[in-house]
Image (tube, rainbow, N blue to C red):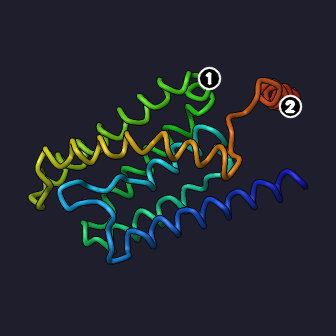
Amino acid sequence: MEKTAKDWRFRLLFALALFFIVASIAAPVSLLPEIIPSPDLIYCLAICWLIRRPRYVLSFTVISATLLCELLILNSPGLWSAIMLLLCEYFRLNSERISRLPFWLEWGVAAFFFAIAQLSYHVILNIIFLPAAPLRAIVLHSAMTALCYPMVVLVTTFVFRVTKPSLKEVILFHTKANERKI
């Protein structure tokens, strides 16, 4: 019972963090110069939390925030949300494996998948004849997102106290899962 309440508290915290990210995107003020694209903080936060504690992240909240952002910045709604859903489920399924990697490899995996997702988004938009950003903008956007990922990890770890599971927690989880199978 206590574990479920804790899970829901962190899910609410995650949803509030996404709300503040969406609100900052909707704000008419930008702190970055116009030639520098803003990073995708929704992606960074979602992937960071999915690697550390996947049960705290509901796909519905990520998709809702992504769809709302697409509507606010007048992108084609749904495509990036669908790509984010695929990314979230990939990281959810592989969270245990990725969480054992050293941070620099985790960072590389997150940056690599974001770049691939951005290229896929660009290619799909070109295939269906919708306006797409130039390749230079996609590379800059991917680079900015990759550069912001460590900052999101720091905030997640030291402010929100969402950390990778310890070896004891992993062993306990697998022991309980094996007991249920028997």
Looking at this view, is 57 or 18 the one in front?
Answer: 18
> Relative to residue 118, is residue 135 drawn left or right?
left
Separation of marks 1 and 2 at Cα, in angstroms:
20 Å
> Which of the numbered marks, if any, corresponds to residue 100?
1
> Relative to residue 9, is residue 21 drawn left or right?
left
> Which of the numbered marks, if any, corresponds to residue 176?
2
The residue shown at (17%, 45%) is 123
Q: Amino acid at mark 1?
A: Arg
Q: Determine the image quadrant of residue 81.
A: bottom left
Q: Earlier in the sequence, mark 1 or mark 2?
A: 1
137 relative to 75, above or below:
above
The residue shown at (59%, 46%) is 49
Please, what secondary structure does the residue beneath circle 2 have?
Answer: helix
Position in image of residue 4 (x %, y %): 82, 55
Label 2: how many Cα within 10 Å (few below 14, some 14–19, many 20+): few
Residue extending furthest bottom? 28
The residue shown at (76%, 29%) is 166
The quadrant of the picture occupied by the C terminus is top right
63 relative to 98, above or below:
below
